[in-house]
Image: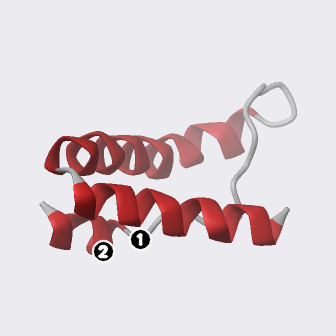
Amino acid sequence: MARIQEITNEVIVRGACENPDHAKVYHSMVTYLEDYAQWRDVSAPFNMSRTMESLPSLEEIEACL
């Protein structure tokens, strides 16, 4: 799973750099997931979301904006 997430993150950053609209969406998504992580951790074991070990780099996405 870690390798799949790594490849996914690379594709997200590449897509962000190819299209500014994608960069805005990905930036919003990653920011939300980072913020939501606190609630997800507090609500365990009653939550229903998947915990991602790593997220795409916000710095790399911001560089594409």
**Which residue lies at the image location 17% right of the left edge and 73% below the top edge?**
63
- Residue 48's place in the image compared with 51, above or below, is above
Residues 30 and 7: in front is 7
Residue 18 position within the rendered picture, expressed as x and y whole percent measured from the top left: 25, 59
Q: Are marks 2 and 1 in contact (CB under 8 Å)?
A: yes
Q: Residues within 10 Å of mark 2 (few under 14, many from 20)?
A: some
Residue 43, percent across and down? 72, 32
Which residue of the protein is positioned furthest toward the front in this rendering?
Answer: 18
- Which residue is label 1 attached to? 57
Identify the residue at image location x=42%, y=50%: 30
Q: Residue 5 placed where, x, y %?
A: 69, 62
Counting the numbered discs, the total is 2
For the N terminus, which image quadrant? bottom right
Q: Helix, strand, or loop for circle 2?
A: helix
Numbered circle sitting on residue 8: none
Q: Give the residue type at disc 2.
A: Glu
Q: Quadrant of the C terminus?
A: bottom left
Kind of residue sitting beneath label 1: Ser
Q: Image quarter for residue 32?
A: top left
Check disc 1: other Cα within 10 Å, few if <14, some if 14-19, many if 20+. some
Q: Residue 36 in the image: x percent, y percent?
A: 51, 40
Q: Is residue 7 above or below residue 28?
A: below
Residue assigned mark 2: 60
User: Colour scheme of this structure image?
Assistant: secondary structure
Q: CA distance from mark 2 to mark 1?
A: 5 Å
Please indicate whether residue 5 sits to the left or right of residue 10 in the image.
Answer: right
Rendered residue at 18%/41% (across/down): 21
Q: For the residue labelled by badge 1, is the local secondary structure a helix, a strand or a loop? A: loop
